[in-house]
Image: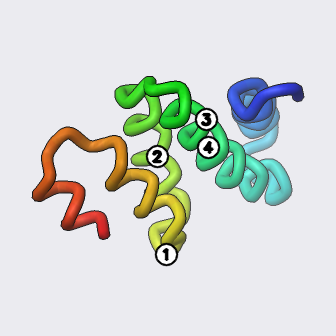
Amino acid sequence: AETPFEAMACLEHVLSINPKNDRAKAGLKSARLNAGVAAAKANDRGLARELLLRAVQDDPENETVWLWLSGVTDDPYEAVSYL
C-alpha cells in the first residue's frame, strides 16, 4: 500500500476474511495510528480524531496515540485529559 489509508483498508479487508489473523491485527493498529497522524498533518482534524480514537481503542497504552489525539481535539479540557 502506498498510503496509511490504503494499508488500513487492506488490513481491514484481510480481517473481514480472517478475523483471527494476528499479523493483520497488529498491522492495523499501526496503520490506524499512521493514518490518523497523516490526517492530522493534512489538517483533517475530524478524520484524524476518528482514526486516533479507534487507534486508542486498539492500544490504550500507546502514548503516541494519546499525544496526537490531544492535538486534534477542539476542547482544551479534553486535550488535557488525553495528555
Residue 76 x, y percent position in the rendering: 14, 52
On the rendered structure, is 51 left or right of 7? Answer: left
Residue at horizontal 75 percent and vertical 58 percent from the top: 26
Q: Cα distance, mark 1 to mark 3?
A: 21 Å
Residue 63 x, y percent position in the rendering: 49, 71
Nearer mark to the viewer, of 3 and 4: 3
On the rendered structure, is 2 left or right of 38? Answer: right
Q: Which residue is mark 4?
A: 32
Number of marks present in the image shown: 4
Instruction: Say if 27 sits above or below 37 in the image.
Output: below
Nearer the observer, 66 or 58: 66
Q: Cα distance, mark 2 to mark 3?
A: 11 Å
Earlier sequence position, callout 1 versus callout 3: 3
Nearer mark to the viewer, of 1 and 3: 3
Residue at horizontal 17 percent and vertical 55 percent from the top: 78
**Tag shown at residue 38:** 3
Q: Which residue is mark 2?
A: 52
Earlier sequence position, callout 4 versus callout 1: 4
Assign a secondary structure to mark 1: loop
Question: Are the residues at dot 4 and dot 1 in contact (C-beta closer than 8 Å)?
Answer: no
Residue 64 x, y percent position in the rendering: 53, 65
Q: Cα distance, mark 4 to mark 2?
A: 7 Å
Q: Three-letter amino acid code at disc 1?
A: Glu
Q: Cα distance, mark 4 to mark 1?
A: 15 Å
Residue at horizontal 70 percent and vertical 53 percent from the top: 30
Q: Which residue is mark 1?
A: 61
Q: Three-letter amino acid code at disc 2?
A: Leu
Label 4: how many Cα within 10 Å (few below 14, some 14–19, many 20+) = many
